[in-house]
Image (cartoon, rainbow, N blue to C red):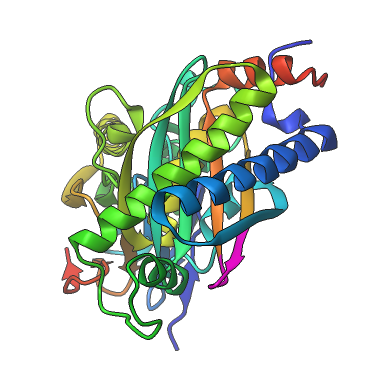
Amino acid sequence: MSQMIKVGMADLNICKSPNAITTLGLGSCIGIAIYDPVTKIGGLAHIMLPDSTKIRNNSNIAKFADTGIVELVNRMVRAGAGRTRMVAKIAGGAKMFEVSGTDTIGSIGEKNALASKKKLRELGIRLIAEDTGLNYGRTVELHCDTGEYYIKSVGKPLKII
Amino acid sequence: MGKFTFDEINSMYFDVLREIGNIGAGNATTAIATMLGIKLSMEVPNVKLMGVQDLNTAIGSEEEEIVGIYLGVQNDISGSLMFLLKMDDAHNLVNHLLGRDDAYKAPFDEMDLSAMKEIGNIIAGAYLSALSAMTNLNITPTVPYIAVDMAGAILSIPAIQFGQMGDNALLIETSFGGETVFEGYFILLPELDSYDKILTSLGIML
């Protein structure tokens, strides 16, 4: 019987096949899924901000792309995942309001996506799929039996990447 | 007084926010009656402090569709303001505004979205003029933007803003009455140094 593990905002967790792991209502946040296809161990982080070093109050590791991804990888390794086999898929980082010019809420989604990709590159984890940007919310599920990343949005067909 | 952090918030600040909310609500009632010709009373029953991570479920479940209206805030302070409605309440409001039957629940069209942006603008203007009056600061809204989407996705915006300042968020519940009864939510998001300005002007010590 497979279970669905839920990850909240500024949160992360790991799962093993046949379970799946989900996070709901990604707006400008990014859902980073990492997977080892041999051990079928997966992890999902729901991050809100790009860089923990830019924020004074930065004790919540899962809130930031830089610290969240590192922690997720560490947890997966401790559970038996193979570091060199890991691949990543990311989703989210939408621009929820069509603001113009200098308003920072217009660019935070993109910044989160860029920071996530940067950290994955630094860790040598290959990004094999992404569904980021545009202007709508996403709910995601990482299915640890197959490594598939399901992406659901209001009024749109299911996307599997 | 040191630099403001949300985590040191005290009950006096809550009372002030509620007070500003009620005054703003009063202004909004008058403004709406004058500009739109409909009778709508507003009051602020509650100001809630919560963890940033809980904001995305504060209005309903993360996947529940809601309407979010976003406005920037400018002049003496900078930041933003959001006004949020559940779908049924949004339909009721727009139907009331446009003189349509209560039962009309078709997806929002351009006119509906425009009407909601306008209401958001009026309510924000009213709230900010109450805040201006109490603080003696010049505070006005900018252009309104609207999104209709999952609550979690829309609330990620204020969550991220609050998240930059710490781990807490503030939600102002507003209930509307008169010919139709419904509820909305306000989130006021000044930039961090604007919070200091507001609190200093209000004479609140932390």
Residue at (59%, 16%) from the top-left corner? B137
Residue A47 versus residue B134: which sits nearer the camera? B134
Residue B143 versus residue B29: which sits nearer the camera? B29
Q: Is residue A28 left or right of residue B82?
A: left
Vertical position of residue A19 compared to residue B115: above or below: below
Q: How many marks?
A: 0
Q: Is residue B173 left or right of residue B97?
A: right
Vertical position of residue B170 compared to residue B190: above or below: below
Q: Quadrant of the C terminus of chain B?
A: top right
Instruction: Determine which quarter of the picture holds residue B175.
Output: bottom right
Expressed as whole percent of the image width and height from the top left, the position of residue A152 reads 27, 69
Give, as a single range, the part of the protein colored magenta.
B175-182
Vertical position of residue B26 compared to residue A39: above or below: above
Expressed as whole percent of the image width and height from the top left, the position of residue B59 reads 55, 62
Expressed as whole percent of the image width and height from the top left, the position of residue A115 reads 31, 31
Whether residue B176 appears in magenta in the rendering, the answer is yes
Chief SS of the magenta region: strand
Residue at (63%, 49%) from the top-left corner? B172
Does residue A1 show up?
Answer: yes
Residue B75 versus residue A110: which sits nearer the camera? B75
Residue sitting at the far top: B1
Vertical position of residue B2 compared to residue A150: above or below: above
Instruction: Determine which quarter of the picture holds residue B16.
Output: top right
Residue at (59%, 45%) from the top-left corner? B52
Expressed as whole percent of the image width and height from the top left, the position of residue B157 reads 42, 43
Q: Quadrant of the N terminus of chain B?
A: top right
Residue B99 versus residue B9: which sits nearer the camera? B99
Does residue A72 show up?
Answer: no
